[in-house]
Structures are given as C-alpha cells and as structure tokens.
Image (spheres, rainbow, N blue to C red):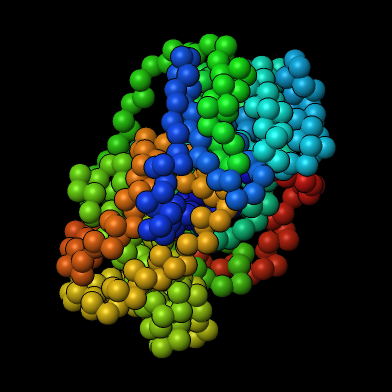
Amino acid sequence: MYIANKNILPIIPLAWAFLISPPVQAAASKTVHEYKLTNGMKLIIKEDHRAPVVVSQIWYKVGSANEHSGITGISHVLEHMMFKGTRQVPAGEFSRIISINGGRENAFTGQDYTAYFQQLSSDRLPISLRLEADRMRGLVLPDDEFEKELNVVMEERRLRTEDDPQAKLYEQFNAAAYVNSPYHNPIIGWMDDLKNLKINDLKAWYQHWYAPNNATLVIVGDVDPDQTHTLVKRYFGRINPIQGAPLKPRNETIQQGLRRITVKAPAELPYLILGYKTPVLRTATDKTDVYALEMLASILDGGNSARMARELIRGQQIAASASASYDLLAGHDSLLLLDATPAPGTSVADLEKQLRTQIQKLQQQPVTDEELARVKAQVVAENVYQRDSVFYQAMQIGILETVGLSWRLLDHYVENIRAVTAAQVQQVAQKYLNDDQLTIAVLEPLPIEQKAQQMTGPRGNHGH
C-alpha cells in the first residue's frame, strides 16, 4: 500500500489528521512518554486506557524521496517483501500469527517514510514486538518471492495509475512541478525502473535503511509506559545500529515561470490541477505562513459552505467537483493544490479562469472575521473525532517524528490555527500563489474505447 495527500494516494485524510481539541491538547504531554534505546531507536508511548487495545507502528525514515533514478519504487517493493519471511518466521506466517491473535496488520509507503502497524489486544503486544524486531534485520529475501511481488507491484501500477486517468495526470503533474525535488518521482515507481529492479538492489536498500537508528516505534493504547519500555528493550535493544552517510538537502530549484502540461488519456471527463509551490512546517522560515496556508486551503474547500462549493459548484455551476489541499507535514517543500472537473458545457479554460479568480479574491481582499471564525470552528469540530482512534493518534506522532518534527507540536496546533489572522491569509496568498510558482496540468479525454485497446496483460491481486 502506498499513500500520501494528492501527491501520492491517500488511505486516510491526513490534512487535518493531527488536529485535536483543547482538552485533549492540554493532556497530551502528560500521557506521552519518549525514550531512546542505546542503539539509537526512538520509542514514543502514548497512554490511552479507554479500551484494552494497543496499536504498534514502526516508522522507517525512508520512502520514495530517498530513491534515485533507476530504482524508483524500491521502497514500496521492499514494503511488500517485509511479509515474505525471515529465518525465524516463514513467508505468510507474520500475517497469520497476528490474525490468530485477533489482530490486524498492514503497511504503507509514502514519500518520506515506510511504516508497518499492528492493532491488537494490549496483552498481545509482545507478539507484535517480537515479530517486528525479527524482520528489522532478519529478512531472507528469496528470489522467487521477489519476482512474484515485483509482478504484483507492476500490476498495482497498471491498475492504480496507468488505467486511472486522474492518477496518471497527477503522476505527470508531479514530474513537471518538481524538477530536482525528491518528490519528482512516483512512490510506486516508473514502470521501466520496476522492470529492471534486481534482488541485489533490494538487499542493499534493506541493509542501508532498515535499522534501529533509522526507526521510530510508536505505541498507543492501554499500556504501562515503563513496562512497555522494558519490553521494547528486550526485543529491539540487541539489534545493532548502522552507519550511513548524512542525507543531502535536495532542495527544489527555483521556478522561473508558469509551467503547463496536457495529458491525453481515455476518460469520461476532463480534469484540471493547479499547484503552487509552498513551504511546509519543516522548511518554512516563518512558521505562521504554514498555518495561514492551512487556513487558506480550508477557506476554499472546507465543506459545503466553503468558497469552492458555494461559488463554483452551486453558484456559477461551472464545476462538477472542486477541491483544495495542502500538506504542511511533508518533509520537503510541497504544493498547495487546486483541482476540479468542469460541469457539462464548461470548458477547462473557463474553469481555470474561475479557479484563479478565487485566488485573486484572496489576494485582493481579506476574508471577513465572520468567515474566518466559521472556518476555524469547522476545522476543529470536524476533526475532534480523530482523538477516539488509537490508530490515528499513533499516525499523528509517527508522521511528525519521521519528517523531522516533534510530536510536541500536537500541543500547539489548535492555538496556532486560532491565531491566524485575515491579514496573514491575504499575505500568504500574495506571497506564494503567483504564476512564477504555478504548474497547471490538464487531462484531455480520449474516447473510452481506446482504453480497452490499451489494456494488456493479466489482471490479478495487488498490494499487501
């Protein structure tokens, strides 16, 4: 499974996933315990005693952003292979053991991380830890399993990207928007790279990145922190760290004018993407810009009362669908995205004009206090339910820590959002949302009949 915001393929709505209400905020620091093992592995435990369950997630600081041309997709392929056996646990046994103990497990690959999780009764946590520690350095990576999983991943690419016109557009859009950023390449990899990937490539990747000092273990649920720390040391403490070269910054080159691409593919409707280069929490010099961009995206697309729905879909009826998104938790500079499908009888050019008009309005006139207050309240209210899930609590911590931030930012998110002013929203619109930082991608539909002619090869299962 591979995920992200619009830049990848999400399995959960991460844009607000770490938003929590003020009462939970105040208690967060008191229930979170941070440790570091002598081999460099970070351990973060969050107590939640409302139910006798626990989530264990191990986050490796490696994803598609660490790959280079020729081996794109290797992080995702390795994610699949992590279920194909160690010297102690044969292929398929990991999932079977978790299942017979009443748990569920899976994994996901993103641009900045690869993560593996199990959710089960809290008294079964040792089983999860034993299995995860075993495969941190103990994979056997057999040739026959590699060939099978590589074929699965290539089929996954065909189904989810090559046969999906919007996914294909996003892939080409990212490749045009990012020149030398590590976000240029797709998480699932380019097909030619997958076809030429070798088992020795995978072995080297595994040995280089999968080690305790490149991992964060997040445990959330009905556990005792000190006892859990002792348990983690028992299973992971004897694993040796690795020595790796410091990562290069790989900053995106400065864009010097509007970029525009067209992708032709069999599809029922055209599709439009506008992406503006923006900083993120990790890279921004002025952190208030990031929270203002977060609010700006919600002003445009924060439910039925937001501007896109009110003005473009219901009002002018120029868009059949329209959305805005911004991922402030990316590891590198990212994009504020607008995407839309034109309503029947509307051209893509007219829709683009209206989307850009929405940006101009934000640049030229501050939002009213009433609108800003409504959006802030909605952002908080719509996401309070996230605190009820131990899985999402662990996700919040894991993402922050793995992209180079701190889980402690959870304690300040709400206050930072509430501090955003109308003037700040206008300022970031003027500062970042201009043509010199804009890439536009258009899906030009071809007749659907061509799709059947282009589809070749067998269809099978895909993904873990």
- Residue 146 is situated, as x and y percent measured from the top left of the image, at 72, 27
- Above or below, comparing residue 79 to residue 380 in the picture: above
- Residue 351 is situated, as x and y percent measured from the top left of the image, at 40, 76
Q: Residue at the location (36% across, 78% down)?
A: 307
- Residue 232 is situated, as x and y percent measured from the top left of the image, at 58, 23
Q: Is residue 365 left or right of residue 144?
A: left
- Above or below, comparing residue 333 to residue 261 in the picture: above
Q: Nearer the viewer, residue 97 or 147?
A: 97
Q: Residue at the location (63% across, 33% down)?
A: 79
- Residue 293 is situated, as x and y percent measured from the top left of the image, at 29, 59
Q: How many marks?
A: 0
> What is the quadrant of the N terminus in the image?
top right
Q: Residue at the location (57% across, 53% down)?
A: 389
Q: Is residue 161 left or right of residue 273?
A: right
Q: Nearer the viewer, residue 449 or 214?
A: 214
Res. 201 in view: no
